[in-house]
Amino acid sequence: MASTLRFVNGRVYDPANNIDGEVRDICIKNGKVVDSLPDDTPSIDASGMVIMPGGVDIHSHIAGPKVNLARKLQPEDHRHDPHPGTNFTRSGSGGTVPSTFATGYRYATLGYTTVMEAAVTPIGALHTVEELHDTPVIDKGFYLLLGNNIYLQTLLKEGRHDEFKQAVGWWINKTKAYTAKLVNPGGDEPWKGKRNSNVTDIDEKSDLLNISPRDVIEAFVKTVNELGLPHPPHIHCNNLGHSGNYKTTLETMKTAGDLRMHLAHIQFHSYGGEPGKNPDSKAVEIAEYVNTHPNITCDVGQVMFGKSTIMTADAPLAYLLRGFKKGKWVNADAECESGCGILPFSYQEHVFTHALQWAIGLELFLLSEDPWRIMLSTDHPNGGSFMSYPKLIRLLMDKEFRKEEIGKVNQKAIAKTNLPSLDREYTLNEIAIISRAAPARALNLKHKGQLGPGADADITIYDDQEDKEMMFNAPRYVIKSGEMVIEDHEFRNDYYGKILHSAPEFDEEISEDIRPFFEKYYSIEFENYGVADHYLHEHEIIPRVSS
Amino acid sequence: MAENTRIVKNATCTFCGCVCDDMELTVDLDKKVITKAKNACVLGRAWFAEHQIDDRPVAMIDGKEAPLEEAIEEAAQVLVNAKFPITYGLSDTTCEAQKQAVAISDIIRGTIDTTTSVCHGPSGLAFQDIGESTSTLGEVKNRADLVIYWGGNPAESHPRHFRYSVTPKGMFIPNGKKDRTVVMIDVRKTPSAPVADILIQVKPGKDFELLWALRALVKGRKVDPQIQVMTGVPLETMTDLVERMKNCRFGVLFFGMGLTMTRGRHFNSGALLALATDLNEFTHFVAKPVRGHGNVTGADNVVSWQTGYPFGVNFSRGFPRFNPGEFTTVDTLTRGDADAALIIASDPASNFPKAAIEHLKKIPVISLDTKETSTSKLSHVAFATSTYGINTAGTVYRMDDVPIPLRPAFESPYPGDEEILFAIKKRVHELILSKCGATGATGEARVASKLML
């Protein structure tokens, strides 16, 4: 493989460097973007093509224990969608939860080169790392589920805030994670210990520990910012999916004060109405809050019609959804750390709630005043597969197409939203922001999501087409770390990316505080827990940031 | 104590699916034996104590010692030239070796299957149909106040299983066994029975009927009293059990091969998983198959993440297809489909049905095993490999899907399974490359350019 590449005459969208559709050369040397190359370097003509940094997915579920359970659960989902290998790539299975190889290759065929797995239990981190090694092309990292960790909550109850900070640092280091993830904080204990009940209010105190979800959220926002993790706490709020939950979402955001916070799949948290009754849209209220609070970033978690798979650490939610059709369902409790629920799902145009969810997601995109802070995601595979991103991009860029699609769905639901009145069309530059530049910035991946000199040569080149779904479905070239992985729409090379993780400083002594708890309540040995260094292979530690 | 002694703490016993990782091994490095295995059960002690380095050739072709390179070349030639090569075993080796085995099957467009197809395979199928409410064993230790074993005899098959489920004190079980009710449901009174507070003896082959009646009672339906005659279990016993299940705080159903390998098979497992699911309407309830081999759970996981399916996977069309009964090993052998076999860490020649063994004798077999076995004896190419967990590092998965790293006790002169399989993969890949180069059919044959898989 050539160590240099040059593309000429392409239209470049590199919002991080304020380049909005300029025709200019892109030069690549030794895996990085460089200013220029000697004149005799061969060039590839990219006339009529659009050049963007490789896509960065800030929230997706692609590897680890829950993902593998979901794979095993659904042979019917793989069967209709085989993923043949090529001369250079392994075979696999598709569907909403593809095999590891298919996941990496399919992300690459959409021009994505970095993906973050959004929810991993510490005890399942080793499993996740093993799967990520088998996920080709993309660079990847994962967020660590710490929001229902009983040891950490005990520290909060006892008011031991410094130990809490050290312990979070210990856990991130021990598992090679990227940042802390909170899912329905406070919800696991009532689920596992109180006959499958749940916490319903952000200020509801737990019987066991006498702390509320808000106490947990506050502690993590403060701690993660103090530790300088490259991404703030990544939060799945309480009450996901419930009517009236937008109040919880607003309260969660307020808890951050002016510190960094990322809200995951905010669409699922933007519902009005009374609990237990039909929801309506509160996209305006949520978008307004995000627009006016620059410390908040979020991804949308757009719902796309068709088959999906619900997989979440929010076990009570999965059980609630299971109640509608009483179909197959997985619950998987991880000791002292998390819950988990999985079920096959399908979003249907004629169903009021599904159409409303779809419309609210689009509203949030269209009401966003700062594309740097409201990012593209479907919470893959919860809202739909990442393979539906091209269609979502067309919905955002093409108002006529959007109008047609609105006409096909439940009109009572549409009447509860402002969607028909929103005429905005995303530009290519804005798409480059929400799918590349913004997630890279929110992750503090300074060498990604941009094409300035020194950036990682993760690059996607599309044929410019009127139909944006077609365009984003099949890039002509995909370059990963300077290697031409896809050329003329075909795989030319295999590539295995690296694991991106954090290594915050912490006081080692905390492990002697964790050990007795661990030995009492876990079922494996303390020394055998976590991800040892030799498991990492190719990896990169993302440096701390100062808030 | 011998002079050259080493202590290995937090070592892992890979004998059974419990994968206890609290072993303290005393190793005599001169004699290359483990003289003491603290914390091990009777099975684990035997596993460690009886492990000696045999004096066998590292590779044999047709029963004669052969250089390793030659044996790898021969194995690769056999696999590449076969029309329906099968790979089987995998549950007593590391995940790292399992990955290499799946890669080989993918490259040669073969079939891969694991010992799951002859043990908890039906539970895998039931899982695909019903799902499973489950948990890691630590949650059972911390919370379970009702522990039910169905169709298993852990006291003999998994002697330390009780350390997760019955005896330990847990976060919400401060007094250990005193705070739990233990129920054994089986066709006979086994050596596990003394652990139980309640023993329920079901007539052989009537597990499904009993499970279905329990489901009906949980849902408050009337049950035909004839069920007592059919199952041999009094209705009062059933009602009492149902009340206990509905009223416990955290219940668990462990099930064994008494359920999965008797009449009804995946219907039995499915009924049990459905019962656990139903009970979640009333309380928190989980279920878990008690898996046998040390890393059979790893095999399920690796094959699933690489192909989408847990076992019985065929690549002949260039992508994975799953069809138990068609692509499971007993079937591919009995029907006479397989024309070459790669057997890893398993001995089908000693425990498969006669027709399958007869076919195995007719085709070229490549085997990797730590000991001489019936399968290695009939192999065309036989590799002697080192033992995982004792000589080889790597990763295994406990029966509850928890990954655990291995800490080997001493070095073996034999290579690990991963090493041999990697070499075979590399050679198989080169052969396929040259094949497609010769025919020009580059689009047909599939290889990996950088062996990164």
Image (cartoon, grey):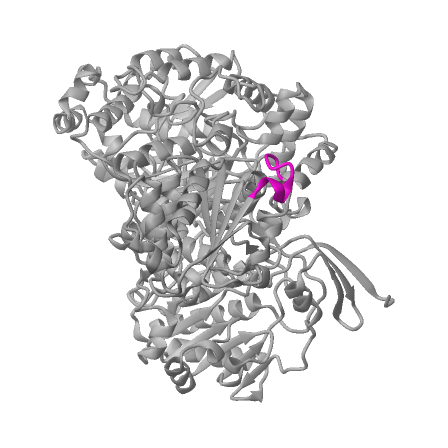
Along the line of sight, which residue is nearer the eye, B185 or A299?
Answer: B185
> Which x, y percent locates residue B328?
36, 68
In this view, the residue in front, B445 or B229, is B229
Question: Which residue appears at 60% of the width and 37% of the height?
Answer: B173
Q: Position of residue B319 (x, y in %)?
A: 32, 61
Residue B67, relative to residue A510: is it above or below?
A: below
Q: In which quarter of the view is residue A227 placed?
A: top right
Which image quadrant: the N terminus of chain B? bottom right
Q: Position of residue A64 (x, y in %)?
A: 47, 45
Q: Is residue B216 above or below residue A389?
A: below
Q: Is residue A501 left or right of residue B337?
A: right
When asked about the image quadrant of residue A115, the answer is top left
Per the rendered image, the range of residues in magenta is B170-180
> Is A327 on the left or on the right of B204, as rendered?
left
Q: Which of the 4 image quadrants contains residue B33? A: bottom right
**Residue A7 in view:** no
Query: Overall secondary structure of the magenta stretch?
Result: loop
**Along the line of sight, which residue is nearer the eye, B423 or B315?**
B315
Task: Say if A384 sits above or below A488 in the image.
Answer: above
**Could you tell me which residue is drawn at 25 percent across and 33 percent down?**
A304
Could one spot residue B114 in this view of the protein? yes
Q: Position of residue B442 (x, y in %)?
A: 32, 67
Is A359 magenta? The answer is no
The number of numbered discs placed on residues in the rendered structure image is: 0
Residue B176 among magenta residues: yes
Q: Is residue B69 left or right of residue A38?
A: right
